[in-house]
């Protein structure tokens, strides 16, 4: 299958924004005229980290013109390839981003409203991971990291007086 055939099929089966994002990602990653195996395209599109790498410069189109998100595009492409979008790739991406945050640094934000919002944001990200299907069936992969992060968040919330 060549890329043009793939994009034509995608254009017929998915929303315009999904087609445009896939085309944008392909143009950045592959030679547009190259023949490519569908398996290789599938592997490329179900790896969530590729969306950060190849769609960051397209974010304004996704958000402003189409009122969509990378997550929606990802879900649609996973569905197109008959893959569960709540998978290891998305889990690892989310975990990496939340583990790299240190809730203790929020203690130094002087503006109470901003500080509390930042704390709630990181707590929300942890909750999203915990509520994901992939995590619930594979808790052992990150239970220690998640529990430690929750402990630190609870400590920070207690310190700043959030219940």
Image: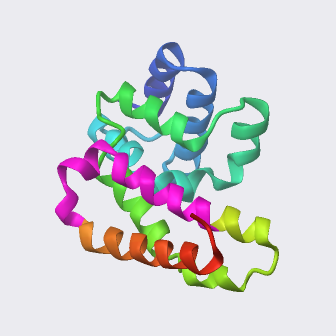
Residue 59 x, y percent position in the rendering: 70, 47
Residue name at image x 36 percent, y 38 percent:
85
Residue name at image x 82 percent, y 74 percent:
111
Residue 4 x, y percent position in the rendering: 49, 28
Residue 88 x, y percent position in the rendering: 29, 52
Q: Main secondary structure of the magenta part?
A: helix
**Color encoding of the figure:** rainbow
How many dots with numbers? 0
Q: Which residues are magenta?
A: 119-141
Left or right, residue 138 beside residue 58: left
The front one of 65 and 100 is 100
The front one of 156 and 16 is 156
Residue name at image x 21 percent, y 58 percent:
139
User: Which quadrant of the rendered structure holds the N terminus?
Assistant: top left
Examine the rendered structure and indicate whether residue 50 appears above or below residue 156.
above
Left or right, residue 74 beside residue 163: left
Examine the rendered structure and indicate whether residue 28 appears above or below residue 119.
above
The front one of 33 and 16 is 16
User: Which quadrant of the rendered structure holds the C terminus?
Assistant: bottom right
Residue name at image x 49 percent, y 67 percent:
97
Residue sitting at the far top: 12
The front one of 130 and 86 is 130
Asked if the stretch drawn in magenta spans residue 132, the answer is yes
Asked if the stretch drawn in magenta spans residue 42, the answer is no
Residue 61 x, y percent position in the rendering: 74, 39
């Amino acid at each position: 299958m060549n890329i043009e055939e793939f994009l034509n099929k995608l254009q017929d089966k998915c929303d315009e924004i999904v087609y445009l994002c896939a085309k944008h990602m392909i143009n950045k990653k592959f030679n547009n005229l190259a023949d490519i195996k569908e398996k290789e395209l599938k592997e490329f599109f179900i790896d969530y980290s590729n969306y950060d790498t190849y769609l960051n410069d397209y974010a304004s189109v996704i958000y402003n013109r189409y009122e969509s998100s990378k997550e929606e595009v990802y879900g649609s492409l996973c569905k197109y390839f008959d893959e569960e979008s709540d998978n290891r790739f998305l889990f690892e991406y989310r975990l990496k981003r939340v583990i790299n945050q240190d809730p203790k640094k929020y203690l130094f934000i002087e503006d109470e409203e901003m500080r509390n919002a930042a704390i709630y944001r990181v707590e929300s990200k942890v909750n999203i991971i915990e509520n994901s299907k992939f995590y619930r069936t594979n808790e052992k992969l990150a239970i220690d990291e998640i529990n430690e992060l929750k402990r630190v968040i609870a400590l920070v919330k207690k310190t700043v007086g959030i219940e």
